[in-house]
Amino acid sequence: YANVKKCSNEGRALMQLDFQQFLMKLEKLTDIRPIPDKEFVETYIKAYYLTENDMESWIKEHREYSTKQLTNLVNICLGTYINKKARQKLLAAIDDTDRPKR
């Protein structure tokens, strides 16, 4: 999901539906419960719905995501809705945080 090039409101909803379908099929194929890292993906998909104001605090709270994942989130999710200065501020917040590699 971090490699999407473009995302509309409908695309965001489809991401959630696709992931739910994937989980249902995966649960039928395996006995592993709960599915590992399920919340990791769900939280990332939900971040696509955040506003500019909420995104900065979300970035600071979710240190588990890589710099690339967060950068793509800002550029794709908010890139067309915010001005260049606001986008640079969010990207700077990502760079300022020392993130562990996942």
Image (cartoon, rainbow, N blue to C red):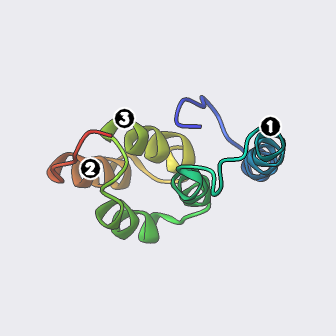
Residue 68 location, x and y as percent? 36, 35
- Foreground disc of the pair 3, 1: 1
The residue lying at 55 percent from left, 49 percent from top is: 36
Q: Amino acid at mark 2?
A: Ile
Indicate the quadrant where residue 34 lies: bottom right
Q: Amino acid at mark 3?
A: Lys
* 3D distance between C-alphas at marks 3 and 2: 9 Å
* 3D distance between C-alphas at marks 3 and 1: 31 Å
Indicate the quadrant where residue 67 lies: top left
Which residue is identified by label 1?
Answer: 29
Residue 11 location, x and y as percent? 76, 44
User: Badge 1: how crowded within 10 Å, few (<14), some, or many (20+)?
Assistant: few
| Quadrant where the image shows the N terminus | top right
| Quadrant where the image shows the C terminus | top left
Which residue is identified by label 2?
Answer: 94
Q: Of residues 6 and 34, which is closer to you in this image? A: 34
Q: Is residue 58 above or below residue 42?
A: below
Q: Which mark is residue 68?
A: 3
Asked if the residue at tag 1 contacts the one at tag 2, i.e. Cβ–Cβ closer than 8 Å, the answer is no
The residue lying at 74 percent from left, 40 percent from top is: 30
The disc, 3 or 1, on the residue closer to the chain's N-terminal end is 1
